[in-house]
Image (cartoon, grey):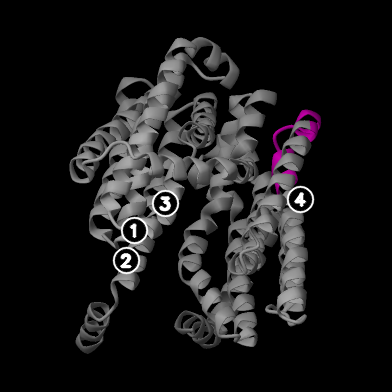
Amino acid sequence: MKNTLEMLINKYKNMSAPVKAAFWFTICSFLQRGISMITTPIFTRLLSTKDYGLYSTYLSWETVLLMLVTLSLYKAIMNLYVKYENQEAILSNICALELVLSLIWAVIGYIFRKQIGQLLGLSTVLVGCLFVTFIFQSVFQCWSLYKRYVYDYRTLILVTLFSTIGSAMLGVIAVFFVNATAEARAVSNTIVVAFIGLILYISVFRKGKTFYNKKVWGFALGFCIPLMPHYLSEFVLQSSDKIMINYLCGSSDVAIYSVAYSAGSLINLVTNAVNSTFAPYQYQKIKSKEYELLSKRANQVLLFVGIMLAGIMFFSREIVMVFGGMKYLESVEVIIPICIGVYFNYMFQLFARVQEYYERKLTVVIPSILCAILNLLLNYIFIKLCGYQAAAYTTFFCYALFCLIHYHFYRKVCKELLNGEQLYDIKGILIISIGIILIGAIIMMINHVLWIKYMATIVIFVLMIVKRKWIVSNIKMIIQK
């Protein structure tokens, strides 16, 4: 045991800075999501379904409006670092530009707060929280990207965890002791974001020593504004459901859907960690033309994701009971289509990365825009007809279509640049995909017949014990490769 520990410590010490940074960023991501999951059952029980749904809607608006207000200028930083050497000066300039934009919008938001509140379906307090958050959240985005670029994982992890823990703890205190409303939760989060953001602004401007550089501001605006349709399309596919449900059904239904979405997205804890290593692996294997090995590993990873999702679908009822309790039990019905949608969302990235590797930018942007528009139309039609549950099915359908379109463009790249040679085992991927859909359909049928479900659990558990050596050896092989 002691020798094994020493070996692991030595192995860690010999890691390069990028590998160490990737390792700690993955740990940090797990901790962030873990804290969020721990507090979700607390807030679902302390807040009414109406207030929990209202806060979920608020968070969705925060995501999309932050993109529009700041123009996602932080995404230009990496390209600017290629052009200029003074990284801290670049950071200072981009933070300054985002500060100017967010302050202008804050003034507009204050003047028209009532009208904006009516348009978004939020109270004036929540509207105020939105615009204050934009001012300080923008600097955190820029600063985080800079810290990742220079592999300063210690500072970033400390600040990130302080923000996550601080927001969670202050939120629980505010909701429990002050007022059990969406406003109390939003104000507590805004206080933490503003406190950290103010410190970061002072640090960034003191070290960067510049506020305005015409070339840097011009490049950032020219780089990010044309990409806004793509950024907005990603948001529509991932988060617009809650906004539309709020408009068409009400905030209580948003709460129920949000709990189901949180449960279905549990897999993101794993997929985010997998992608941090598998995405570079894909690039390496494409570059070295090791297509057969890439195909095998892609199938293994996809099967692993599918098995994890099958587990979430199978225990969807139990997960909802932990996350929300009896009052959210009806959300079980939509977890299965959400999980299948998450599967296709992960799978399309296999095809999209091939296009990104060969710099086919247009074929990455076009499908996201088309599917985002389709998702909005289908949500509007079917949520009105069938209720909030329809959002899970329309999103699943759009992700499946999204995946199919990316597959078409992937085939086109293979035909034009690789003489028709395939990078993936499409037959294997198709079998795994059909298997996931069939498993979802079966689980949906037996989910409420508890004796069948628990008998199946016992059988699966026994099989896992019998085949434990085979399972462990395969997991080890995937991790090692």
- Please say whether residue 82 is one of the residues in the magenta stretch: no
- What amino acid does circle 1 point to? Arg
Position of residue 192 in the picture relative to residue 57 (left or right) = left
- What amino acid does circle 4 point to? Phe
Q: How many marks?
A: 4
Q: Which mark is residue 21?
A: 2
Residue 474, given in percent of the width and then of the height, sits at 53, 84
Label whose residue precedes the other's in the sequence (2 or 4) = 2
Q: CA distance from mark 3 to mark 4?
A: 27 Å
Label whose residue precedes the other's in the sequence (3 or 4) = 3
Label whose residue precedes the other's in the sequence (3 or 1) = 3
Q: Which mark is residue 33?
A: 3
Q: Within 10 Å of the Cα at label 3, are there few (<14), some (14-19), or many (20+) other Cα atoms?
A: some
For discs 1 and 2, the disc positioned in front in the rendered view: 1
Q: Secondary structure at mark 2?
A: helix
Q: Which mark is residue 148?
A: 1
* Magenta-drawn segment: 381-395
Q: CA distance from mark 3 to mark 1?
A: 19 Å
Position of residue 55 in the picture relative to residue 92 (left or right) = right
Q: Within 10 Å of the Cα at label 4, are there few (<14), some (14-19), or many (20+) other Cα atoms?
A: many
For discs 3 and 1, the disc positioned in front in the rendered view: 1
Name the quarter where the N terminus is drawn.
bottom left
Q: Secondary structure at mark 4?
A: helix
- Please say whether residue 392 is one of the residues in the magenta stretch: yes
Label whose residue precedes the other's in the sequence (1 or 2) = 2
Q: Which mark is residue 397?
A: 4
Q: Are marks 1 and 2 in contact (CB under 8 Å)?
A: yes
For discs 4 and 1, the disc positioned in front in the rendered view: 1
Q: Nearer the viewer, residue 145 or 345?
A: 145
Q: Quadrant of residue 258?
A: top right
For discs 3 and 4, the disc positioned in front in the rendered view: 4
